[in-house]
Image (tube, rainbow, N blue to C red):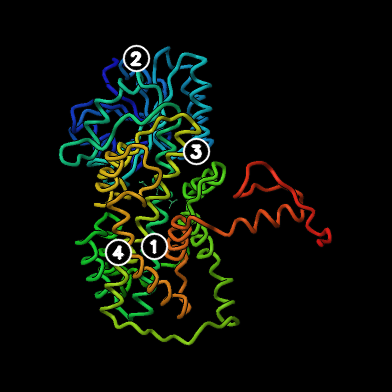
Amino acid sequence: MEAQYDYGMIGIGTMGRNLVYNMCDHGFAVAGFDKDTKQVEVFVKEADKRKVFGTSNVNDFIQALKSPRVVMLLVPAGAIVDSVIQELKPLLSEQDIIVDCGNSHFTDTDRRIAELSKENLHFMGIGISGGEEGARYGPSIMPGGAKEIYARVAPVLEAISAKVNGEPCVTYLGPGSSGHYVKMVHNGIEYGVMQLISEAYHLLKEGAGLNNAELHQVFCKFNEGPLQSFLIEITANIFSRKDDLTANHLIDVIADKAQQKGTGKWTSQSAMDLGTPIPLIDAAVTMRELSALKEEREAAELKLTGPAQNFKMIKDEMILELEQALYFSMIAVYAQGMALLQQASKEFEYNLISADVASIWRGGCIIRATMLENIRSAYMRQPSLQNIMVDDFFAKQLNKTQSSARKIVQTGVENGIPVATMMSAIAYYDSYRHGWLPANLIQAQRDYFGAHTYQRTDRKGIFHTHWDQKQA
Ligand code: 6PG
């Protein structure tokens, strides 16, 4: 076997396969490996005239690659990544690179970098977003690892990535696990936006009584304004999709139990560890969990009552207010994700440039949205901006839309329609804009029952009070 392939891809299921064809269309020759011979067959067949080589024999696969080798992995996160690495290790030579393109946990990526560096092998963690379509025609790519190693894969990543105004949606993000961390936060934001849109759907369906054709129209209209984004666009399309099996709209026969592979939860877990508030993302994860309790919810429906529904807003008014409320909440969720990245960057020494992150999210990925252009501009104006909510542009947008967000949340609460993430957007906003919060009481309580001490506003030092001591 002559070593004539530029790159290798392990895992040639839908995503891996499409990524390979994308690479081939940009002039690269790629070898694909999969244990599943059926996948190999499909891979070779669909490749058509492209220069690929498919095999289920790992030795043949490695021998087909030009040296120093670059082996990409698109396999499920977790133990499988480790077992693939173990299998590859004896076959690789010094300076070869393994690139993990899956949604691996960032701590696993750091561990793998350390383990492989002992054997002079390089490991990079790269987040790729955009689903099947993105993989095939241009994803957003979030690479992390050693800068000199990135330089070796930069040409192919830049070639295959999505482009916005000619700029590739990929750039070197930082060392270690930074790429996978950024991808994880991308997914956290994705969970938040999806839940926000679902709450809007609930209100429009139950409150304004919109049918699917009307919902389609409303979301198409939303997609022409400040909410313009991939997730709003596909939501509009979902409402017009007919079922292949029945005469219904497909959306009406899909079970209302959200699943998850864990990246949203990881975002919340990491934010808790870093002490960074991302309440909207936390609420979105929680709502997926609540949705999964289908049987419990159906039983509770028979026992627990809500208010008599009385929607004071007429349909058109609700649609207008909702557009504003969604915009308000979306600013909050991107603000939380970006703030988390800044904190993680300090803690893990990623040296992330926030404007770069916003820039590569503008195209190809699931959370791409017009708003990201504004986020990028905000960070270009102020690279160390702590929270985009206080950027002049976003402060103006929030000040303008906050009353609509309140009206919509009020409508939800008054009518017993859960709007957990929209509510949490307002609570985040109101807390962040309050110079004073009632945490003095929490400090007093802690000191009262546990002698945890407190600081004062009028003098320096640490204080403790004997709270139950009789005072004159
Ligand atoms: C992407 C997506 C993708 C993710 C799915 C499913 O950026 O292309 O984020 O990486 O795996 O969206 O995620 P859940 O199963 O957790 O919803």
Q: Nearer the viewer, residue 161 or 193?
A: 193
Q: How far is mark 4 from mark 3, CA to CA?
A: 38 Å
Asked which secondary structure carries label 4, the reply is: helix
- Please tell me whether residue 176 is drawn above or below residue 48 in the rendered image: above
Q: How far is mark 3 from mark 1, CA to CA?
A: 25 Å
Query: What residue sits right under mark 4 in the picture?
Result: 400
In the picture, measured across the screen, residue 37 lies left or right of residue 431, that is left
In the picture, measured across the screen, residue 211 lies left or right of residue 177, that is left
Question: The C terminus appears in which quarter of the rendering?
Answer: bottom right
Asked which secondary structure carries label 1, the reply is: helix
Instruction: Evaluate whether residue 378 shows in this view.
Output: yes
Query: What residue sits right under mark 3 in the picture?
Result: 105
Q: Which comes before the other along the chain, label 4 or label 3?
A: 3
Give the label, 2 or 1, closer to the camera. 1
Q: Which comes before the other along the chain, label 2 or label 4?
A: 2
Q: Which comes before the other along the chain, label 4 or label 1?
A: 1
Q: Which mark is residue 68?
A: 2
Q: Position of residue 432 (x, y in %)?
A: 45, 55
Give the label, 3 or 2, closer to the camera. 3
Give the label, 4 or 3, closer to the camera. 4
Give the label, 4 or 1, closer to the camera. 4
Q: Residue furthest left?
A: 166
Query: What residue sits right under mark 1 in the picture?
Result: 196
Q: Residues within 10 Å of mark 1 (few under 14, many from 20)?
A: many
